[in-house]
């Protein structure tokens, strides 16, 4: 077991000992954020689901590499007793697609403005498959890492227009400051065999998404045989923040 996976097990044990993994009539909802965000981006969704009695865990996504991130999330899934609905935002969609493989307790996947790659595809490849993404021009100067990789951020002064145009200005400004970077390597690492081929999958996205073109999101939903696809007019990539009710409603549907 890697140090990262071991950390996930310890973290999960602490979380679930406080009730998140206790026996429940409802499945545990495991939320996985994507690049340029953190677990707080799920707060609106969490509040709704908790009020409805769902056990919820918003696990941190390391954003270091697809294989390592998927292994981390897989370890968290292994620590949960009972059924799980895995929910991924953006890059988190690729992570849950790989992390769910081999887990019989995962009953459904929910893709929230998220990538759903086929085996061998990369995020970078899918981002350019259809025109419309303006993310490249919104990135800040890369931060060089000691291993030769680089961390990528969205420039703070471009964050709201690029990522969260339908989020209040003050909220988007705080999101820009607290964003988690993703490595360039994670965007170019190929996906393993995806779990969406064998699990019910649900999709929600906005047609105002500037990170992932709506045409690309529609393509991935159709290819995955989406059980239900929700498209919200003019919604941004930060749909977890701007449309928590719609996101929670689709998760509820997947949890049935």
Image (cartoon, rainbow, N blue to C red):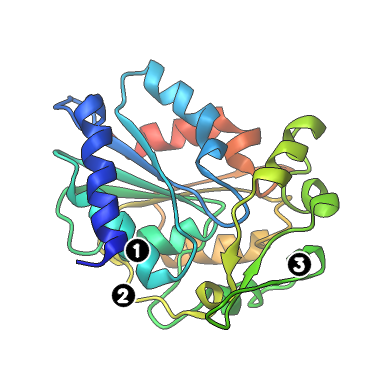
In the foreground, 85 or 181: 181
Q: Residues within 10 Å of mark 3 (few under 14, many from 20)?
A: some
Residue 187 vs residue 17, the one in the foreground:
17
Check disc 2: other Cα within 10 Å, few if <14, some if 14-19, many if 20+.
some
Q: Is residue 50 left or right of residue 102?
A: right
Which secondary structure, mark 1? Answer: helix
- Confirm whether residue 27 shows in the render: no
Labels 1, 2: front one: 1
Foreground mark, 3 or 1? 1
Disc 3 from disc 1: Cα separation: 28 Å
Q: Nearer the viewer, residue 61 or 225?
A: 61
Image quadrant containing the C terminus: top left
Give the mark nearest the N terminus, 3 or 1: 1
Q: Looking at the image, which residue is at 46% across and 64% down?
A: 116
How many residues crowd mark 1 within 10 Å: few (<14), some (14–19), many (20+)?
A: many
Residue 26 image-quadrant placement: top left
Residue bearing the label numbered 3: 132
Residue shown at 71%/71% (left/top)?
A: 142
- In the image, is residue 107 above or below residue 17? below
Tell me where residue 231 appears, x and y as whole percent. 60, 45
* The label number, if any, that marks residue 110 in the structure image: none
- Which residue: 14% across, 38% down? 82
Give the residue at mark 1: 70
């Amino acid at each position: 077991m890697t140090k990262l996976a071991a950390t996930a097990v310890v973290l999960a044990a602490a979380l679930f000992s406080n009730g998140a993994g206790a026996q429940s009539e409802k499945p545990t909802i495991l939320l996985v954020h994507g690049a340029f965000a953190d677990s707080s981006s799920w707060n609106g969704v969490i509040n709704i689901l908790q009020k409805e009695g769902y056990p919820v865990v918003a696990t941190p996504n390391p954003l270091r590499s697809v294989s390592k991130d998927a292994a981390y999330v897989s370890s968290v899934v292994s620590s949960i007793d009972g059924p799980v609905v895995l929910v991924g935002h953006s890059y988190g969609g690729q992570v849950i697609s790989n992390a769910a493989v081999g887990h019989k307790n995962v009953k459904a996947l929910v893709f929230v403005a998220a990538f759903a790659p086929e085996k061998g595809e990369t995020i970078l490849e899918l981002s350019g498959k259809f025109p419309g993404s303006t993310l490249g021009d919104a990135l800040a100067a890369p931060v060089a890492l000691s291993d030769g990789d680089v961390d990528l951020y969205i420039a703070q002064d471009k964050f709201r227009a690029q990522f969260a145009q339908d989020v209040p200005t003050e909220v988007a400004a705080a999101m820009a400051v607290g964003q988690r970077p993703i490595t360039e390597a994670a965007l170019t690492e190929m996906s393993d065999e995806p779990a969406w081929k064998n699990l019910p999958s649900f999709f929600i996205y906005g047609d105002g998404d500037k990170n992932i073109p709506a045409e690309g999101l529609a393509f991935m939903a159709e290819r995955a045989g989406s059980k239900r696809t929700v498209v919200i007019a003019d919604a941004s990539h930060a749909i977890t923040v701007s449309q928590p009710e719609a996101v929670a409603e689709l998760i509820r549907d997947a949890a049935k």
